[in-house]
Amino acid sequence: MSTEIAPLTSGLALGHLLRDEVLVGGRWRTGTGAVIDTVDPSTGVTFAHLHAATVEDVDEAVRAGERAALESGWRAALPHERAGVLRRVGDAIERRAEEISALQTLDTGKTRGETLALAHSAAATFRYTAAALETLEDQVTPPRGPYLTIATWEPVGVVASITPWNSPIASDAQKIAPALAAGNAVVAKPPAWAPWVTLLLARITEEAGLPPGLLSVLPGPGRTVGEALASHPRVGKLTFTGGTTTGRHLAHVAAEKLMPATLELGGKSPTIVFDDADLTQAIAGVLYGIFSSTGQSCIAGSRIFVQRTIFDDVVARLVEATRRLRVGSGTDPRTQVAPLVSHSHRDQVAAMVDAAVADGAQVLIGGGVPADPELADGAYYLPTIIGGVDNSARICQEEVFGPVAVVLPFDDEEDLIAMANDSDYGLASGIWTADYRRIHRIAGRLVAGTVYVNTYKQFSISTPFAGVRDSGVGVEKGREGIRSYMRQKSIYIDLSGEPLPWAAEQARAVDPTSTGS
Ligand code: NAD
C-alpha cells in the first residue's frame, strides 16, 4: 500500500462501508488489481484503500451475470415481481440516504445538501422504474393473414454500465434500475476516483433481495477494466456516461460488436439572458447552473450569453453575486461551492483558465485558489467568470468541468442562435425571458437535448434525457429508458390450422396419414 490511511475526519461512522472488497458475480472479495487510494478532496487525506478489479474479474462477472439472470428466474420473472425488488431497493436507499450522502461527500467532496438530494433522487429512480415497469405493454399488431402477431420485448442479457465520478449514486441508479427492470444482469464499473457509493448500492440491492450475481461492481481503470467490459462478447448493451473522447472510443468498440450503446457525454451549454428577463431570477439561476456541483456537471451552463443592452449591468451583478458565494468543505452546511473531485482535476481546471488568460481572456472574478489557509490542502478553485473572449475561443468551446463560466454579449435572436449553436456539443440550454413567443421560437432552434426556461438544472426521472452532437447518443430516463435495455421480438402464431399454401400440395403428398383423395 502506498499511503497510510488517516482516521476519517468527517466524524461519521463510515468505516464499515469501506471494506476492501469488490463484488464479482455474487461474491465479495478483495480485488486482484492495483490499489486505489481514495482521497478526501477537501483535505487531501487518503481515507481508504481499495484493490481494483481486473480484466479476469470482468469475464467472471459477465458470465455469472448471464447465469444468474436465467437460473434465479429474474429474466423470466413477471414485471410486478421484479418491480417488488426494485421498490425495496428504493426504500432502502431512502432509509440509508444520510449514510450514502456522507460517503459520497467524503469520496467526491460534494456538499452534503447535494449528495443527500442525489441519494433521494436515486431512491426515486428505483421506485419510478418499478412503477413504470408494470405499465410496459407488448403489442398485438394488426395481422395480414390468419395469424396473431405480437410485438414483444425481451432483455438484452448482460448490461455494461460505465459511469463517471461526478454524481455516482444518481448515475448508477439511472442505469442499474432500468437495466435490472428489463430483466438483465448488470456489471457496473464505477470510476477509480469515486468507487465507494456504487459498492454500497450493491450491498443495498443484496439486502433488498436482488438475486446474487445479477449485479457485479468492478471499480478499476477505464483503459483495462472498462475496455474489457465494453468489449466482452457476452455483454449485450453498453450504457456509458463520461467524457466525449471516451464515449467516441467506446462507440467504436460497440460498433465492432454490433452492440447497442447509450452514450451520455460532455457539454458546453449556453444559458441566455434577454433584456426582458426577471434579473433576480436569472442571476440566481445562472449562478446555480454553473457553480453548483462546483461546475462538475455535464449540463453546467458554462457559456452565459447576455443581451448587449443589459450586458454590463448583468455582468456586474453576476460578478458581485459570485464574490458572495460561500466556498468551503462539503460537510459545512453553509457551503455552496465545495472542492473539486481531486487535486489533479483542480490543476487541470486551473490550467485551462491560465491558457485562456494567455490567449487574451480577462478574469472578472476568481481565477485561482481561495486565500483561506483552512482550505489550502483541499482541491479548491474559486468560482470564476471570464470575459473579453468571443465564442470561438477555446475556453468557449472546450468543456472545463469546473466552476468556470464565460460571459458573451449578443445583439438579437439571430446573432444569439448562431453563437449558441456554434458548438460541438448539444446537451442543455437555458433561456431567461418574459416573452412566451420568444421562448417557443428559441427553444425550437437551440441544438440541445434539454431546454430550461426561467429555470435550470432541474431533473425528473420521468422526463427523457439525451444529448445531441458530441453530447451523446440515445435516451435515458422515462419509460423509454427501460425499453432501451430491451430488444424487440416479433412473434407470429398461426390461427388457421392449415399448411401454408405454397407447399401444401407437396406436404400432403408425403403425409402418411393422408387419404390421398
Ligand atoms: P471519463 O470519460 O474519463 O470516464 C468515465 C468512465 O469511463 C470512468 O469510469 C472511466 O474509468 C471509464 N473509462 C475511461 N476510459 C475508458 C475506456 N477506454 N474504456 C472503458 N471505460 C473507460 O469521464 P470523467 O472525467 O470520469 O467524467 C467527466 C465527463 O463525464 C464530463 O465530460 C461530463 O460532461 C461527462 N458527464 C456526462 C453526463 C451526461 O449525462 N451527459 C453526466 C455526467 C458526466
Image: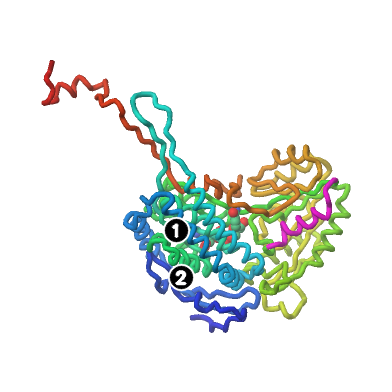
Q: In the image, is 186 to the left or to the right of 500?
A: right
Per the image, label 2 sits on a secondary structure element best described as loop
Foreground residue among 350 and 91? 91
On the image, numbered disc 2 is attached to which residue?
52
Give the mark toward the camera: 2 or 1.
1
The numbered mark, 2 or 1, whose residue comes first in the sequence reads 2
Q: Is residue 149 above or below residue 229?
A: above
Q: Main secondary structure of the magenta part?
A: helix
Q: How many marks?
A: 2
On the image, numbered disc 1 is attached to which residue?
85
Q: CA distance from mark 2 to mark 1?
A: 29 Å
Q: Is residue 97 above or below residue 397?
A: below
Q: Quadrant of ligand 1?
A: bottom right
Q: In the image, is 309 to the left or to the right of 56?
A: right
Answer yes or no: is residue 131 visible.
yes
Residue 509: image quadrant is top left
Instruction: Pick out the residue farthest to the top.
Output: 517
**What amino acid type should be assigned to the residue bearing mark 2?**
Ala
Foreground residue among 119 and 506? 119
Query: Which quarter of the figure is the C terminus placed in?
Result: top left
Query: Is residue 236 located in the magenta-colored stretch of the structure?
Result: no
The crowd level at tag 1 (other Cα within 10 Å; few <14, some 14-19, many 20+) is: many
Seen at 38% across and 32% down, the residue is: 149
Q: Which residues are magenta?
A: 276-292
Seen at 66% across and 67% down, the residue is: 113
